[in-house]
Amino acid sequence: MPTAAHVIYIPAMLMLGVVLGYILGSRAARDALLADQARKEARAARRAALAAKDSGLKDRSPEDPDGSPSAENDEAAPS
């Protein structure tokens, strides 16, 4: 037959385990959400930089890889 100490000790340890699990679990979930948010922001920044780089490349003509105006374009333009 369990003693009175077991009747108090076992439920107390179970409750302690529940409380510690809740605290550690909520902390891990918060850290995971923050890491996921940082990962999404970094991905969005990389995509924005790539889009800006690609749009800058699309504006250039194939004859002008450095983006500078060529002499041919200046002669063809009416003054």
Image (cartoon, rainbow, N blue to C red):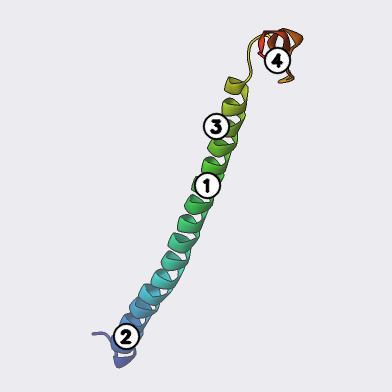
Front residue of 11 and 43: 43
Q: Please tell me whether mark 3 or mark 4 is closer to you in this view.
A: 4
Labels 1, 4: front one: 4
Label whose residue precedes the other's in the sequence (4 or 2): 2
Would you identify the image quadrant in which residue 55 lies? top right
Q: Is residue 17 left or right of residue 43?
A: left
Contact flag, marks 3 and 1 (Cβ < 8 Å): no
Amino acid type, callout 4:
Pro
Q: Quadrant of residue 13?
A: bottom left
Give the mark, 3 or 4, whose residue is nearer the N terminus: 3
The three-letter amino acid code for the residue at tag 2 is: His
Question: Which of the two discs, 3 and 2, labels the residue nearer the N terminus?
Answer: 2
Residue under pointer 2: 6
Q: Which residue is mark 3?
A: 51
Mark 3 and mark 1 lie on one chain; the one further toward the N terminus is 1
Picture residue at 46% right of the left edge, 63% below the top: 30
Q: Residue at x 42, y 67 (%)?
A: 26
Amino acid at circle 1: Arg
The 10 Å Cα crowd at callout 2, few under 14, some 14 to 19, many 20 or more, is: few
Residue ID for mark 4: 65
Establish if 4 lies above or below 44: below
Q: SS for tag 4?
A: loop
Which residue does the numbered mark 1 point to in the structure image? 39
* Gap between marks 3 and 4 measured at Cα: 18 Å
Sequence-first tag of 1 and 2: 2
Label 1 to label 2, Cα distance in Å?
Answer: 48 Å
Are discs 1 and 2 less than 8 Å apart at CB?
no
